[in-house]
Image (spheres, rainbow, N blue to C red):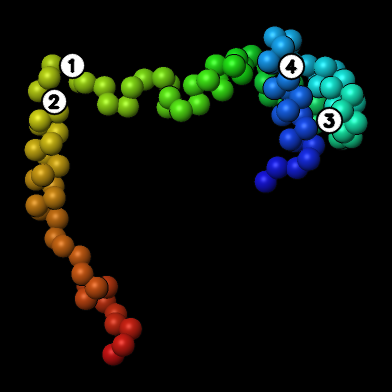
Amino acid sequence: MSTKAELACVYASLILVDDDVAVTGEKISTILKAANVEVEPYWPGLFAKALEGVNVKDLITNIGSGVGGAPAAAAPAGGEAAPAAEAKKEEKKESEPEESDDDLGFALFE
């Protein structure tokens, strides 16, 4: 859940990043003061510290690309590992017994 102070600091940080200005607690406070938004004094510094060393533009533009930037379905080296993995999955499915409601050990309507 977000508070008004958190959202205000996020928006101020995004304004700074969009203008290619370093995100600091003082600059966040300046933007908040210009927007007539009152926050506790620790919020701007907290956000500045959290964004220290983070490339926010890359973070925003790659939001849907997944973790680490690696493709989700990368081909394994050698080419034979994928069919072997599929065969193991099929064997596992065949060996697993089917579950039914009777196997739970109790009945609701008896």
Mark 4 or 1 closer to N-term?
A: 4
Label drawn at residue 16:
4
- Element marked by disc 4: helix
- Element marked by disc 1: loop
Q: Residue at x 72, y 29 (%)?
A: 10
On the image, the x and y values in percent for residue 90 come to: 10, 44
Q: Is residue 29 visible?
A: no
Q: Which residue is mark 3?
A: 42
Distance of label 4 from label 1 (alpha carbons): 44 Å
Mark 2 or 3 closer to N-term?
A: 3
Res 109 quadrant in image: bottom left
Q: Residue at x 69, y 16 (%)?
A: 17
Q: Residues within 10 Å of mark 3 (few under 14, many from 20)?
A: few
At label 1, which amino acid type do we have?
A: Ala
Mark 4 or 2 closer to N-term?
A: 4
Distance of label 3 from label 4 (alpha carbons): 18 Å
Q: Which residue is mark 2?
A: 81
Q: Residues within 10 Å of mark 2 (few under 14, many from 20)?
A: few
Distance of label 2 from label 1 (alpha carbons): 8 Å
Label drawn at residue 77:
1
- Element marked by disc 3: helix
Q: Residue at x 84, y 22 (%)?
A: 31
Up the image or down, 105 lies above or below 51; here it is below
Up the image or down, 93 lies above or below 88; here it is below
In the foreground, 56 or 45: 56
Left or right: 74 in relation to 81: right
Up the image or down, 72 lies above or below 24; here it is below
Mark 1 or 3 closer to N-term?
A: 3
Res 82 quadrant in image: top left
Query: Residues at badges 2 and 1 in contact (C-beta under 8 Å)?
Result: yes
Q: Is residue 68 visible?
A: yes
